[in-house]
Image (cartoon, grey):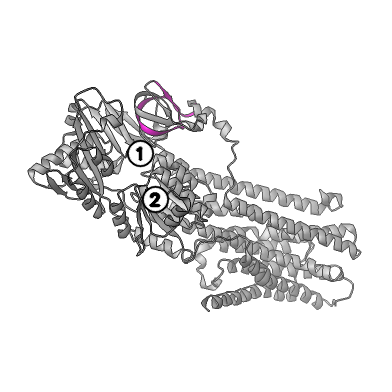
Amino acid sequence: MLAFVAGLPQLGVAIFVVIVFNGVFAFAQQYRAEHAAERLRDLLPRRATVLRDGRRFEIDAAELVVDDLVALDPGDRVSADLRVVESHDCRVDTSMLTGESIPSTVEPGSLVSAGTFVVEGEATAVVEAIGSATRIAGLAELTRTTVRPSGPLANELTRVVRTMAAIAVGVGVSFFVLSLLVGMPTSDGFVFAIGVTVALVPEGLLPTVTLSLAIGAQRMAGRQALVRRLEAVETLGSTTFICTDKTGTLTENRMAVVEAWTPSGGARIDGSGYDPTATIDARPLVRDALEVAARTALRCSNGRVVERDGEWVAQGDPMEAAVHALALRSGVDEAEAEAQHPVVRRFPFDPRRRRMAVVTPGEVLVKGAPDAVIPCCTNSGNAEAAVAALAAKGLRVLAIARRDLDGPVPPDATTAERGLTLLALLGLEDPPRRHAAAAIAACRRAGMKVAMVTGDHPATAAAIAEQVGLSTASTLVVEGDDLPADDARFGALIDRDGIVLARITPEQKLRIAATLRARGHVVAMTGDGVNDGPALQEADIGIAMGHSGTDVAREAADLVLLDDDFATIVVAIEQGRATYANVRRFLTYHLTDNVAELTPFVVWALSGGRFPLAIGVLQVLALDIGTDTLPAVALGAEPPSAHVLERPPSRGRLLDRSVLRRAFGVLGPAEAAASMLAFLATMFAGGWRPGETFPEGSLLAQASGAAFTAIVLGQMANAFACRSQVRSPFAMNWRTNRFLLVAVAVELLTLAVFLWVPLFADLLDHAPPGVVGWLFALVAPVAVLTVDALDKRGALRRRTE
């Protein structure tokens, strides 16, 4: 508007085109990022468990149909509107629909809405409505107006943009005032002021960052890490402390019962995974006792083993599948057990009780953590010693107990689980993941601390920690009950690398995340349970498990591991650091260009308007939008460097001293000097000398074209120089970022269009440079690469001294 008012329609149209171009580009990239995120979410379809013909099947939630009978377990997300037909202490979190934070108890006949979560208990329910017919579908329009709070990267980008905009406007106003003081017409002074302002504004920053985040998210998905929020890509790169689960994250979560203890003696089981034909090595009396225990544990379990493609795999909870395999190995007839001992009441697993129970006619059957079950038993004997022996081998221990029931069905779990008889202790092997040790070592090289936070037995946790290399000489193993109540002592205790925190409750897990954040850490917290949601939300990066995790945990998380593998966290952090580095590469690249664009205006100002202006405002816009955009985007797609995990995480600003020094003190001055040299050489070759009247016509146009060409060629070299802050572009593999080669080729083609197509050349008020202009313009890439090499060599020397 100001350009039109000042009588400069060409400038007004050009600025309008720039605004539209940036808007369209930003929209396209944001749309692409959102579309990519939607595609990534499709990699993790929601599942539902249905009961058909008396059997449990796990299906894609989208395949649910009206009248399906659905089984609801703790952690499940309800995928349709359901009418409850049977409930065992089932409680549902309806906060997303009602705002009520206290879970609601559901009874037979209750309606459970899609989008809610099962937090406790079990239930079966009939599907009444699916898809657009559900209650939550009617509220979908309201969610479109919800605005997410800004993340750390968004806040930092806002700070950078505001800082640079303030500087640009301030410098532009200063130049306008200076132009009036030297007697320049107001319109010309306004043009200069606009040129300076445009030269300092990073027009392509935001769309390039969005694209860089989307590329990072896509690369993570290709390596089994699903990003639910694009901003989390960068936050991952700043992680300083990882709190990881044991089961399924550091271990394979492929459980097998390999040892057992009964009051009659011990038994060893061939650890052949879920194969139900494996042998049991035990005396007949022990085998009989183990068969009773296996039948009891099976009635308390829903997980099963099934044969797929010639291999036995777990369906449902891996631990319960291992129990099923043990029952089959012991000769238990599952159908007969169900017929003779039908379940009349369930008391589902509770993280506070740490055990579960089922009531059948005439008996109560219990399984759970040894320290939660053994105190309820009347025949504990030397069970504690057996637990310690099994746990010391790194085995997960499960206690099985029962009691006769003569009276009515107990009204609550406390009444049901008293006076038990301990049947057996099952030692389950969960092998460490193959790459866990290498991943933990990589975390330490990258300056991150790693802690194990688990609900398992401390001896089991300590054994696994040693097997995966988490333990150090100073490793502490602390149980949840022994954690100090004082926040200062608590923080000092847990803020150490390699600590093992065992028997941790969900409430303690939340406190751990909050305390570490308060101590200045960027915390990544893993979780898979229904009660892990608050801790995942409290952490800077909540990480949920894709296979074993509950829907509640996945909804609360920023990152979902599709393979549940700790090593995938390291991959994601590597990509997060690469994305942060790419944003800094783009900033360096663009600010270097700013120096070259601003220099002609500075020279003009210092000469009091007596030195001709090498480039004009429209040429600045052509450089920023026409030639610089694609290389900047290509820098945003730079893959992680080989050494990105061999230094501490960056905690500084995007626009820090290093970026400013490289752009304003090294690369920018070299490019600017080469550009002004090309301009002056062309002017001198045409016979002009300082102090003379500005030349008219072709000489000034050719000189301006030479300066423009020098900046473009310098930016081509700058794009390769910005690929690394420490390595020469000639020492890097150019094939790792082929998009940059294409972008530079397009940049060269665009330069040819701007110089030789009359429409653009006339609009930009320049002409193709002559022989002298070309020779000196070719100095620009040489100068940029030379000062880049000297600067990197000096930086290397300073680091080694």
Residue 42 visible somewhere in the drawing? yes
> Quick one: 510 or 675, which is closer to the camera?
510
> Quick one: 55 or 242, which is closer to the camera?
242
Can you tell which quarter of the image residue 147 is in?
Answer: top right
174 to the left or right of 362: right
552 to the left or right of 738: left
Relative to 37, say whether 416 is above or below.
Answer: above
Q: Of helix, strand and loop, which one carries label 2?
A: loop
Q: Which residues are magenta?
A: 109-132
Relative to 295, say whether 3 is above or below.
Answer: below
| Label at residue 352 | 1
Q: For the residues carrying marks 1 and 2, which lies nearer the camera in this image?
A: 2
Residue 231 in percent (x, y) is at 55, 50
Report the residue at 80% width, 70% height from top.
603
Query: What secondary structure prevails in the magenta region?
Result: strand
Relative to 655, say whether 7 is above or below.
Answer: above
Amino acid at the residue labelled 2:
Leu
84 to the left or right of 616: left
